[in-house]
Image (tube, helix red, strand yellow):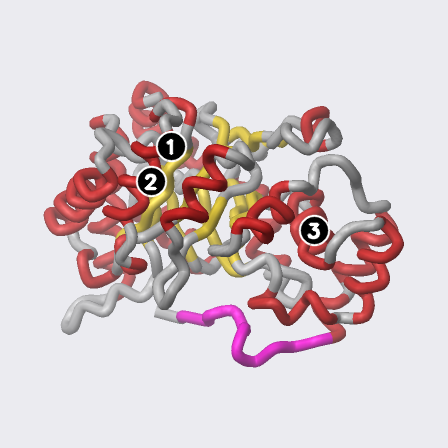
Amino acid sequence: MRAISFVLRRVGVERFRRIPAVVEEQAMYSTESTCPKVSLSNGLKIPIIGLGTSHHGGYSHDAVLYALRECGVRHIDTAKRYGCEEQLGKAVRESGILREDLWLTTKLWPGEYGFNTAKQACRDSCSRLGVEYLDLYLMHWPDAMVPGRSNREVRAETWRALEELYDEGVCRAIGVSNFLVSHLEELKEDCGVVPHVNQVEYHPFQQPGELLAYCRREGIVFEGYCPLAKGQALSHPVILQMAQKYGRTPSQICIRWSIQNRVVTIPKSTKKERILENCQVFGFSLSSEDVDHIRRLHSDLKLVHLSYPLWKG
């Protein structure tokens, strides 16, 4: 893994070579218990569905245990900002799941951007989670929030810290969250390793097509949070109609649509029945016509409070 990083550094601009994300398509249409994986540019494979966590009541110890033990979830997404890393680490240990069988993602908050602070923050997250390494470590936002310094400068310095953590094996993969094309282009010019993942808001009403296409061209896996549009998509007539057509729930239609678009998808719930429901999306597929129909909802409905963050700095 780290040898790949060194090779990318040596070949200059070729370090940002365009390696398409690969989904194990055969698994996508298999049994309900099978979760397909997406290949990162460094050869690692991330489960295409994960369990999201958040602050403001977005964590439940019992729900995480249920997801791991009963639903076969092997991908958990969290962040230092959410304040639940320590509790999540306890749940992972109680689950009995082997560390090597689990994909753990956490995120670096802008308040700890900078070379030394980022490296220490990563090790602190590992300590709270009770692990020796992270599968994926993300810069949480593009806005650096550092007075007197440009966002670009601080992002580049922070990314170099993540590159070093990657080289050291503390992070098996590194990436960003909520970055636009302009931010990714700046990293391309300033740094040495292409982000393995860009995690952004993605659902039927929020489809950043230009960003998605860019990530695909550059070999950056596209990961989507908020796949149900904070519940807003569940009552849309088109989603309800398809739920009836396929004999599935509205949330399953939304998640299935997302993964059929080859987007790593992170639904969030603290309710056991919802977690199970969200995992049961591999026993059916949407027709290409229905996938396109949902895609057109992007232009049919705009939700201001869910609009994509447009940082320019």
Residue 54 occupies quadrant: bottom left
SS assignment at label 1: helix
Point 40% across, 42% down: residue: 195
Amino acid type of the residue tagged 2 in the rendering: Ala
In the displayed structure, does residue 196 sit left or right of residue 28? left
Q: Label 2: which residue?
A: 91
Q: Nearer the viewer, mark 3 or mark 2?
A: 2
SS assignment at label 2: helix
Whether residue 235 is visible = yes
In the displayed structure, does residue 85 sit left or right of residue 181? left
Amino acid type of the residue tagged 3 in the rendering: Gln
Contact check, label 2 and label 1, Cβ < 8 Å: yes
The image shows a total of numbered marks equal to 3
Whether residue 161 is visible = no
Point 43% across, 37% down: residue: 16
Q: Label 3: which residue?
A: 252
Residue 302 vertical position relative to residue 295 in the rendered view, above or below: below
Magenta: main secondary structure equals loop
Q: Local crowd at mark 2 within 10 Å, few (<14), some, or many (≥20)?
A: many
Q: How far apart are the two marked residues, 2 and 1, measured between alpha carbons?
A: 6 Å
Range drawn in magenta: 301-311
Q: Label 1: which residue?
A: 95
Contact check, label 3 and label 2, Cβ < 8 Å: no
Return the x and y of residue 249 as percentages of the image width and height: 74, 55
SS assignment at label 3: helix
